[in-house]
């Protein structure tokens, strides 16, 4: 059914870079045999999934939606995907994204944009726009995305699905092609909160192959699926609900807050003013890390190589000039600049200090509150073709999601209605480190 649906809507929506029909059917048969033998019993056995195209699967095209990796097939599978496969997941394809996960609209893909299933004139958000559109359009049952500054939560909000970015270190980054390594996390995109919890339970693991992955006390995220939130203290940052926030989004968030209050939560507004420095700090840190991570794409080891080159430098230059798109080049230049001698202290070090202060501000908030609630994004989805004309404005749209990555915290986007054009609105719940269960509990109570 999922393959038939994908065949029907893909010409319009373009969620997938690769749709692997034959492979999916073969996986499904193998899983069915295991189910019949009683070897697979979990909730994910046989359920069709999609995987963002920056997450490696052995032998499968893994392009990061970039020309430079357009023919790249990894020789190994990401740990998060292996964890899913162990539970009997059937991976039907690899989803479209902003090139190297840099963007907020899925328009910087070299394979063309993905469209929002709720209205084809609008973007699905990004960078995991393909994953979120595929779930919303029933082209898979759930998907994996990656989130460096909001790339799971923001497109989930624009597409009306549930997306969760786990605490940094919860899901192994082994096999995830790095963008900003200190911020990147893989996480689930699903139709509802219960699915999201089950997928997180399957993908989360301590992995020796990722030195930043951590051993957690427990992994039974589905045990948090109870609707009791009596007495839960939820803080709403005034800074998230004021200037720059679309009034229809604001109304929907306040309505959702009242629902949580009716169900027993205690709501309170508070100040989190430092978050206004999150955008400049993030774009300095993420670009710095990206410029270093993307050095490896030089035409020698992976993917695309420029033709007719005269010598090594000419090959580097041609390969990278032709292989990377405009947004990726912008980030590489910005990142190289802020790391260069003479500017390092003024920009990069300052951004790291800002990051530490933002973390402290969240630590302080979590002395009082169990969770923080606000919008996922300041507006609903913009029209296709509007955002890339003004990158700085596009960066400002990341205002509510980015600080969560800087502080390493878990965050979740949950659908809370639609605007007058019928485009979905998402609320964001933010938890303290390793408190995903509180997020899941509150989101489930709301749903
Ligand atoms: N929009 C942000 C960026 O362009 C976040 C992307 C992400 O989380 N991968 O960097």
Image (spheres, rainbow, N blue to C red):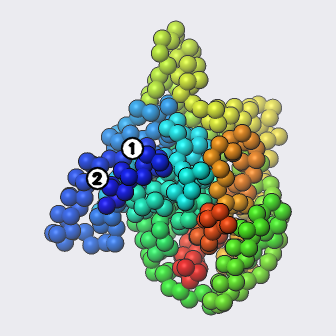
The answer to whether the residue bearing label 1 lies less than 8 angstroms from the nearest atom of ligand 1 is: no
The residue under the point 53% across, 65% down is 161
* Image quadrant containing the C terminus: bottom right
The residue closer to the viewer here, 92 or 440, is 92
Q: In which quarter of the image is the N terminus?
A: bottom left
Q: Name the residue under label 1.
A: 18
> Which residue is located at x 55 percent, y 60 percent?
118
At x 76%, y 63%, the residue is 246
Pinpoint residue 290: horizontal percent, then vertical percent: 62, 40
Q: How crowded is mark 2: few (under 14 residues within 10 Å), some or many (20 or more)?
A: some
**Residue at position x 59%, y 43% in the image:** 107
Whichever of callouts 1 and 2 sits on the residue coming sooner in the sequence is 1
70 is higher (above) or lower (below) than 207: above
Left/right of residue 137 with respect to residue 245 in the rendered view: left
Q: How packed is label 1: few (under 14 Cα within 10 Å), some, or many (20 or more)? A: some
Q: Mark 2 points at which residue?
A: 24
């Amino acid at each position: 059914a999922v393959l038939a649906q994908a065949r029907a809507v893909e010409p319009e929506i373009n969620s997938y870079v690769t749709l692997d029909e034959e492979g999916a059917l073969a996986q499904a048969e193998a899983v069915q045999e295991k189910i019949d033998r009683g070897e697979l019993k979990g909730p994910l056995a046989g359920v069709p999934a999609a995987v963002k195209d920056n997450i490696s699967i052995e032998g499968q095209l893994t392009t990061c939606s970039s020309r430079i990796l357009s023919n790249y097939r990894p020789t190994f599978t990401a740990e998060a995907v292996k964890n899913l496969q162990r539970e009997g997941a059937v991976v039907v394809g690899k989803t479209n994204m902003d090139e190297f996960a840099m963007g907020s609209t899925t328009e910087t893909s070299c394979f063309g944009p993905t469209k929002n299933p709720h209205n084809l004139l609008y973007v699905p958000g990004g960078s995991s726009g393909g994953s979120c559109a595929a779930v919303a359009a029933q082209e898979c049952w759930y998907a994996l995305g990656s989130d460096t500054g909001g790339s799971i939560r923001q497109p989930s909000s624009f597409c009306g699905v549930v997306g969760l970015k786990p605490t940094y270190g919860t899901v192994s980054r082994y096999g995830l092609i790095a963008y900003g390594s200190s911020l990147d996390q893989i996480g689930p995109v699903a139709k509802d909160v219960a699915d999201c919890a089950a997928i997180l339970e399957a993908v989360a693991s301590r992995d020796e192959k990722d030195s930043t992955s951590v051993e957690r006390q427990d992994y039974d995220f589905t045990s948090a699926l109870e609707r009791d939130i009596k007495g839960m203290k939820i803080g709403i940052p005034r800074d998230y609900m004021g200037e720059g926030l679309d009034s229809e989004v604001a109304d929907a968030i306040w309505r959702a807050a009242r629902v949580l209050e009716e169900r027993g939560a205690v709501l309170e507004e508070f100040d989190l003013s430092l978050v206004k420095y999150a955008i400049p700090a993030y774009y300095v840190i993420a670009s710095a890390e990206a410029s270093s991570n993307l050095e490896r794409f030089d035409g020698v080891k992976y993917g695309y190589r420029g033709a007719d080159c005269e010598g090594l430098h000419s090959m580097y230059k041609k390969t990278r000039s032709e292989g990377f798109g405009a947004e990726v080049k912008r980030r590489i230049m910005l990142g190289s600049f802020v790391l260069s001698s003479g500017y390092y202290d003024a920009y990069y070090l300052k951004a790291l200090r800002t990051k530490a202060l933002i973390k402290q501000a969240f630590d302080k908030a979590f002395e009082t509150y169990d969770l923080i609630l606000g919008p996922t994004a300041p507006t609903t989805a913009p029209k296709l073709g509007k955002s890339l004309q003004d990158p700085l404005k596009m960066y400002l749209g990341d205002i509510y999601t980015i600080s969560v990555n800087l502080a390493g915290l878990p965050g979740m986007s949950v659908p809370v209605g639609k605007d007058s054009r019928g485009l979905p609105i998402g609320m964001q719940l933010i938890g303290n480190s390793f408190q995903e269960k509180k997020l899941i509990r509150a989101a489930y109570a709301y749903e």
